[in-house]
Image: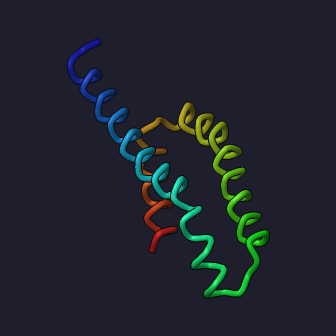
Amino acid sequence: MPPSKERSAWVITLAAAAILMVTMGARQSLGLFISPLQSSTGLGITTISLAFAIAQLMWGVIQPVSGAVADRYGPARILIAGLVVLAIAWH
C-alpha cells in the first residue's frame, strides 16, 4: 500500500475507534440513569428499561445498514455523518 493510502486507513481506523469509545461509554452507562429518571419523571423502571432496550436494539439494527452505506459512499463520509448525528443528539 502506498504511504498516503496507509495513512488514510490509519486515520479512518482511529476515527472509528474514537467514535466507538465515545458511543460505547454512553451506551454502557445508561443503567446509571434509571434511578434519577425514575425519581424525576415518575416513570416506572419498566418504561425506562423498555426505552433503553429499544435504543440497544436500534444500535444493532443500524450497524449493517451503516456498513452497507459505508461500502457505497466510503467510510470517511459515514464517519463524519455519524459524528454530526452524535453531536446533534447530544446537543
Q: Residue at x 74, y 72 (%)?
A: 45
Above/below status of 41 relative to 76: below
Counting the numbered discs, the total is: 0
Look at the image and tell me in which quarter the N terminus lies: top left
* Left or right placement of residue 53 versus residue 80 in this view: right
Look at the image and tell me in which quarter the C terminus lies: bottom left
Which of the pair 21/47 is nearer the observer? 47
Above/below status of 59 relative to 84: above
Above/below status of 77 relative to 90: above
Q: Residue at x 45, y 44 (%)?
A: 20
Q: Quadrant of residue 10?
A: top left
Q: Residue at x 49, y 58 (%)?
A: 26
Residue reaching furthest left? 3
Residue 63, how many percent across, how many down? 62, 41
In this picture the colour scheme is rainbow
* Left or right placement of residue 76 versus residue 67 in this view: left
Residue 83, how many percent across, how many down? 43, 55
Residue 50, how many percent across, how many down? 76, 64
Q: Residue at x 77, y 72 (%)?
A: 47
Which of the pair 23/67 is nearer the observer? 23
Which of the pair 11/4 is nearer the observer? 11
Residue 60, how many percent across, how many down? 67, 44
Above/below status of 69 relative to 57: above
Which of the pair 39/10 is nearer the observer? 39
